[in-house]
Image: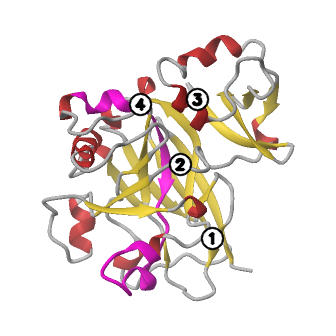
Amino acid sequence: MRLVTFEKDASARLGVLAGDEIADLSGLAGAPVSLFDLLQAGGDAVASVKPLLEKAPRLPLSGVKLLPVIPRPGKIICLGLNYAEHAAEGGREKPDYPNFFMRSATTLIGHGAAIPRPRVSEQLDFEAELAAIIGRRVPRHVAKADALSYVAGYACFNDVSVRDYQRRTPQWTIGKNFDGTGPFGPAFVTADELPQGATGLKIESRLNGKIMQSANTRDMIFPVDETIMLLSECMTLEPGDVLVMGTPAGVGFARTPPVWMKAGDTIEVEIEGVGLLSNPVVDEG
């Protein structure tokens, strides 16, 4: 099943993709208000949506504004240098432990929304990434063999980075948290529709139709199950938390000359079986 968060009557609503239409769950008795609330309910809450589909009114997908899959997650935990070739193109060794950093909810935008190129920088870069969404509370010190049972589903993510700000400090936080630099969507794909851990999937970015990154999720140094295991050594993961799993080689800063996104560009992130996330770039107003 593929769920989307969309805007209706100036508020966020939950729907299910059905071809080129959205089954609008808002207003139905017993329907969850949001994907976040649905995941918080636990159990088989996602499966409980299916009986509602016959009653749900349909909206044309083309006429709907999509929002981030989860507009305000509890935590957005990202991995840097999680593909060996990407680490190498940045002059880094293959890490022995994940390079974790955090994003804030104010960075998130939906499919089709414009990415603002900041007034203060021209170094706006793209990063195609897989996002894993937690569906159940993960206890501390969970075993790797059990870790994937806590993942509810997956989505595409573009970890847009402002490179000169990223490098101004030893930590990457500031360059990863400009407003509007976290495209997330278009849909949440339930884990049962994909291979275990969403491994073996082609992942690609295209800038104005030109392929910039092309790899496979099996190339991740720390796959989803190991990432969850390692995080559970430190913290409690909760339903609706998002793990952004790192980007492959081919990013703009590593090219000669560097390729920075600019106003008028369109950047796409496509992951096999997960979806196509597309966003235009504009200058910050």
Q: Mark 2 highlights which residue?
A: 73
Q: Position of residue 37 (x, y in %)?
A: 60, 33
**Does label 3 or label 4 sit earlier along the sequence?**
3
Three-letter amino acid code at disc 2?
Answer: Pro
Q: Where is residue 42 in the image (x, y as percent from the top left)?
A: 49, 24
Three-letter amino acid code at disc 4?
Answer: Arg
Task: Residue at the far right: name it.
Answer: 9
Asked if labels 1 and 3 touch by Cβ distance under 8 angstroms, the answer is no
Asked if labels 2 and 3 touch by Cβ distance under 8 angstroms, the answer is no
Element at label 3:
helix
Q: Residues within 10 Å of mark 2 (few under 14, many from 20)?
A: some
| First to last magenta residue range | 146-174
Q: Is residue 42 above or below residue 210?
A: above
153 drawn magenta: yes
Q: How far apart are marks 3 and 1 (CA)?
A: 35 Å
Q: Which residue is drawn at 15% across and 64% down?
A: 94
Element at label 4:
loop
Element at label 1:
loop
Nearer to us in this view, 123 or 26: 26
| Quadrant (top left, top right, bottom left, bottom right) of the N terminus | top right
The label number, if any, that marks residue 38 in the structure image:
3
